[in-house]
Every structure is written in C-alpha cells, then in structure tokens.
Image: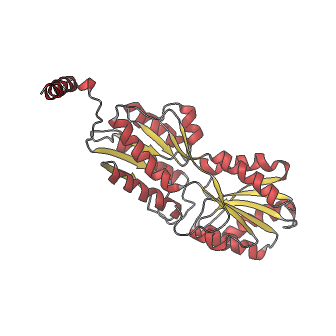
Amino acid sequence: MASLYNRAALASILFVGATAEESCPCPDDKTLRIGGVSHGNVADKFWDPVYAAADRAAMDSSVDLDFARYDESSSLTIQGQEIVGWMIDTIEKMCTGDNTVDGMFSTINDVAVLTALNANCLANGIPTVIINAGGNLAQESGSFLHFIGADDYNTGKDSGEKLLAACPTCQHFYCLDHCGGCTSWTDRCRGFEDAVGDAYGQTIQIDDSSEDAYIASVESVIIGTNGTWGDDVGLLLGTHQSMILFAEALHNKHKKVKLAGVDTSPGLFEVLGDDEWLWGTSQQPYLQGYYPVQMLANTIRMGGQSLQTFNLETGPTFVTEAPEGQAL
C-alpha cells in the first residue's frame, strides 16, 4: 500500500511540474512546414536521390515539405542568372508573407542566394541549413545552423593530388566547369589548381549543348594555348550522363587524356575500369537530402537545440569501381 501511495504521490508531483510549459522536457510534435531549394534542375540526375531522401525524411519526421526544383530547362548549363533569380524568388516566397516555413534549407551557388537567405529567412528568425554548395560562404556568415555536404575546395585539392600521382606523364591539367562559374566548381577548380601547381593550365568553361560544342570548347583552350594537343593531359570534370558521353568522345579523338570525375552516375559506373577513366568521387547525395529535413525538424521541436558542429561532411570519397546494387 505504501508503495502504491508513493507512486501516486510521485505521479502527482510530475503532473504538477509538467503543467508549466517551460518545464516540460517533451518536444513539440506538431506537423512542421519546411522549405528547400537547390540549383539542381530536373535534367541533373545527381539531385534525384537528394529529393527522394528529403521526401523520406519528411515522412519520418512528420513534416510538410516544400522542396522546390527548377524544371524549365533540360540544359545542365542553365546555372547562371536564370536559375539564381528563380532561387531568390522561391526563397522570398517561402520565408516572407503570411505563410512562412518553419525551417529552410538551400544550396548557395551564388552570392546573391546567400544575400536572399540572410534578408528573408534569417532576418525573420527562420532556422536555415545549407546543403551541397556554399559551405564556406555559410560558415563565414556565421548565422546558419549547419552545412551538409562535401567541401568543394578539398574535393578539388584531393583530386589534384591524386591525379598528379596517377598520371606522372601528364604535362598539363585542366578543370572543366560545366555550370558557368557556380560556387561549387569555382572552389573545386581553385583547389585543383593549388594541388597541381605550375602544371595547371586553366579552368575551361565548357559548352555542353552538344558533343561537338563540348569538344570544341576544350580544344579551343588546350590546342589554342599549346598549338597542339601534345603531351598527356589530365582533366577534372563532372560526371553527369551527358558529360560521360562527351568526355568519351573527346578521348576517342585525343587518346592522350586522363579523365577524373567529381561525383558519380550510372554512366560513370559503366566506364570505370577503362584506361582513360581513373575515378569519380562520392559525396553521398542521399544524406544531403535526408539530414537537413530531419535536423531542422528536431532543432525546431527541441526549442532551438542543435549539434554544435557546423560542417557535417558527407564526402568526398574516391570511387574506382561500380558498387554492387544501387549507389546513393
């Protein structure tokens, strides 16, 4: 009987303590509205697992997710002001007005996107996470919760060091930027240049509108600078499906080329093991979609509590052979 009385008394104490909202340790489990935006358009299949993972995390975390994706163009090179303007408009709609999101996540592929996030989301007290691109800009800002992704500068630097060792006969190295100077490839090419040093040729802004245009944009720099294709050349490039096909065509025309990829794709897995292809890199895009939704939901429900670590690195790791099953 005493034991029963003690339990009842304890339950009464706990109940009284829990009536004060500030003393309740339980998170708020209401459905949250979380917004997201990226520079990955529907033609870029790298982003498919990112969006799929975000949807999965929303289901797991009781979140109403609005993760916008640009779908007006099939060209991977539409990464300039057109897509930046669309991202800014999307950010303004999600973070201002009468129906703002509870949390926000975004890539930063341009300084203008950083400005929009600061002016619209952070200024309105909306917790914001950065994914995939713009980690350095986000960290310098000092106001974002986390960056989830691979450090682009280190990806380029590690790739350059590895390519130097893998191709000792290469006299020149070039970084192929397919996204028109977006922050990711600017940082990757900068790291790549620092790694290869005096052997660096330059960053080549490629035209991926067709195979011929792709080859011409590379040749105009390498042959235009050296007068001939000449000695072995090492190239760092994206590994989207079309890029793989174009790079294969480039190699068929110029056999003295070694190709190293950033990111992975089904097309890359088909050619890994060929003499010209050395590797791709993985930054685990699935995690870049899952983590921001889950972490924002937990942070909001726990009253702002979050991990103290800013960079949550998902890569890079080097991939030299096709994995078994589906790689994310």
Q: Nearer the viewer, residue 280 or 236?
A: 280
In the rendering, at what x and y percent does residue 85 appear? 47, 49
In the rendering, at what x and y percent does residue 301 appear? 32, 37
Residue drawn at the location 80% of the way across and 52% of the way down: 200
Considering every residue shown, the one lying at the far bottom of the view is: 252
Residue drawn at the location 63% of the way across and 48% of the way down: 152
Position above or below: 319 against 187: below
Q: Nearer the viewer, residue 182 or 216?
A: 182
Q: Quadrant of residue 172?
A: bottom right
Colour basis: secondary structure
Considering every residue shown, the one lying at the far front of the view is: 1
Count of labels shown? Answer: 0
Position above or below: 155 against 280: above
85 relative to 252 in the view: left or right: left
Q: Quadrant of the N terminus?
A: top left
Residue drawn at the location 70% of the way across and 71% of the way down: 273
In the rendering, at what x and y percent does residue 282 appear? 60, 57
In the rendering, at what x and y percent does residue 54 appear? 41, 53
Q: Nearer the viewer, residue 12 or 78?
A: 12
Q: Is residue 81 visible?
A: yes
Position above or below: 279 against 157: below
219 relative to 127 in the view: left or right: right
Q: Is residue 90 visible?
A: no
155 relative to 287 in the view: left or right: right
Q: Quadrant of residue 91?
A: top left
Q: Nearer the viewer, residue 120 or 122?
A: 122
